[in-house]
Amino acid sequence: MNFSNEVDSVKKTLIENAHLMRTFENSSKEEFRDIMKKFNDEIEKERLEMGEALIGLKTRQKRLDTALRKINNESHSLEEFEAKYKEFQKTEDEKSMTVKLLSEFADFKQEMLNCSSTSNADDDTEIVEDDTNVCSMYDPWTKGLMLNPVRNTKCGHHYDRDSVMAAIKDNLSVKCPIVGCVSKIFVQPNHLVSNEALKKRIHTYKAQQGDEVTNDDN
């Protein structure tokens, strides 16, 4: 087990969980949306603190691994190894480390804050209610408005047909690109079904947008 990889995996889980929880703020019910926003704002601090602790452990572990290799190469006996290791421990204990000043923490914090900004950006009419859930009218690959939306029957998420077919054409190991999706199944053509109701709503939305632009010009 690689400790650094395990820490990175936990950090990724924290960020994906934050993204997923923020999507609930897009609920059509105002009362539920307010409750979720308050909860997410409160727990965001805890996620940052967990990330800070994880990065601190990872940094110390890297220093320990480097020191042990160096001490092992320089030692010619067990007694010498133990002496050098005690000296390293004493020096390490005297060191102070401010994790918040590390670039890795800055990157982690930025990704966490992006969860909030993404949620706010999705509060507009690009979020619509499908027959069974709330979904975006925008394709996760191109970020453009979908023209021919299809639903992944394995997880319920939507993509534009041209985008998803292009993504899986020469790659059999593509998973759902929606942040926070729990499905581990690779996307296959037979998993995709057209969503005519969503397609009609998108066309209606496009027409309304066109009318608004015309009225503004007038």
Image (cartoon, rainbow, N blue to C red):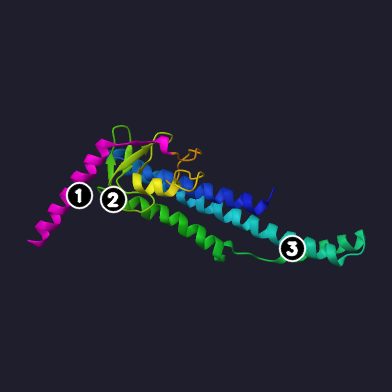
- Distance of mark 1 from mark 2, alpha carbons? 9 Å
Q: Quadrant of residue 180?
A: top left
Which disc number belongs to residue 145? 2
The quadrant of the image that shows the C terminus is bottom left
Query: Which dot, 3 or 2, sits closer to the camera?
Result: 2
Label 1 SS: helix
- The disc labelled 2 sits on which kind of residue? Leu
Residue 100 in view, yes or no: no
Q: Mark 3 points at which residue?
A: 66
Q: Residue at x 59, y 52 (%)?
A: 8
Q: Residue at x 46, y 56 (%)?
A: 111
Residue 80 in view, yes or no: yes
- The disc labelled 1 sits on which kind of residue? Lys
Disc 1, disc 2: CB below 8 Å?
yes
Seen in the image, is 9 located left or right of residue 153? right
Question: Residue placed farthest to the top in the image?
Answer: 132
Specify few, some or many for label 2: CA neighbours under 10 Å numbering under 14, 14-19, or 20 or more.
Answer: some
What range is drawn magenta here?
189-218
Q: Mark 1 points at which residue?
A: 206
In front here: 96 or 195?
A: 195
